[in-house]
Amino acid sequence: MTRVLVAICVISFSFCSFAAGDFPRLQLQNSEMSVSLYLPDAERGYYRGTRFDWSGIIERVDYAGHVFYAPLHVSHDPLRHDSVSGPAEEFAMFEPMGFAEAVEGESFVKIGVGLLQKGNSGKYRFHADYHLIRAGEWDIEQGPDRVSFLQDFNGERGWAYRYRKTIRLLPGKPEMVIEHQLENRGQKTIDIDHYNHNFTLIDGMPYGPDYRVEFPFAAPEPMPIKDLAWFRGNAIEVDEPLGKRSLWITIFEGDDPGGYNAALVRNLRNGAAVEFRGDAPITRMVFWAVERAACPEPFIRIYLPPGHSKRWSSIYRFYAGTD
């Protein structure tokens, strides 16, 4: 049992899950909704891959009889790079801290994960399996409607950071806020990207023609996506079921004029929807989808000289078909 799990049980033993073959998780609630999320754990955690931030992996959100989010894969492998669900976040998708300077066998830092070992490839591959040298430890504080994850991490060759992620439910509303604070405690400048993959499924219905994904900006002209879908107007619409096929498109890249960090995913059959809005300007918006997830992905830039810090947050609102 890790130090983190001991701390959680002292705070609220009723929310800890220790059944054989189960994963540590907790539940947040307010008067409108409940959120089930997994706890980071290097030995027994639901997600132990080397890509996504281990903190705050959301299993599901329940609101007004609707279920939001689901695992991306039916068969779960905790070490698979994308065995996650919900608003999973990744730091430095293209080049983590220390990767470029490291030689084969040396370490680099992945925020929210820990210290990884560079292989024989000179280019970082986000989907590759990197050896985890040392997982970052977490201090966790939890209340009935909020949880905060704190990670102080010292890497090698001058890389170090302090990262806090808080998930809280707003009183009396079907709304969830995800807050971040990252401080550069090392000797080198942090210059990376951060994005939320937003693996979204509503009521278990496969993503396809029965969904509509809307953005706060419009396509200058209709953009086809693999002859299966279109980005036209301010929305992505799918012409036919995806089956085993996938969609991928960059729908915005450049300087955010303000308000572009947002999207809404709606189930057209029953009207249930989830919308997010972030307070950090984006550098691009990517959309990726398979049958088990529609993913509007807002990317932001994080530039932190030594001693500097950054705060950013996103608010999620959930809608029933009658809203």
Image (spheres, rainbow, N blue to C red):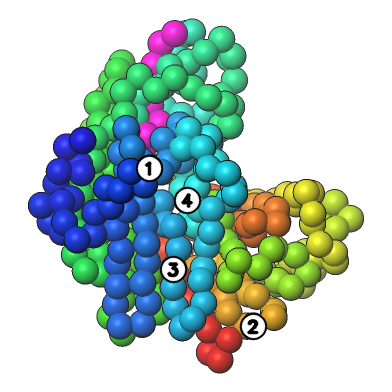
Secondary element at image label 3: strand
At horizontal 42% and vertical 57% (from top left) the residue drawn is 58
Q: What stretch is highlighted in magenta?
A: 105-113
Residue 272 among those drawn in magenta? no
Between 30 and 237, the residue placed more toward the observer is 30
Residue 270's tag is: 2
- Circle 3 residue: 61
Q: How far apart are marks 2 and 3 (CA)?
A: 17 Å
Secondary element at image label 1: loop
In the rendered image, the vertical position of residue 64 relative to residue 121, given as above or below: below
Q: How far apart are marks 2 and 4 (CA)?
A: 25 Å
Q: Are marks 2 and 3 in contact (CB under 8 Å)?
A: no
- Circle 1 residue: 21
In the rendered image, the vertical position of residue 106 relative to residue 72, given as above or below: above
Q: Earlier in the sequence, mark 4 or mark 1?
A: 1
Between 93 and 113, the residue placed more toward the observer is 113
Image spot of residue 211 (x, y percent): 70, 71
Q: How far apart are marks 4 and 1 (CA)?
A: 23 Å
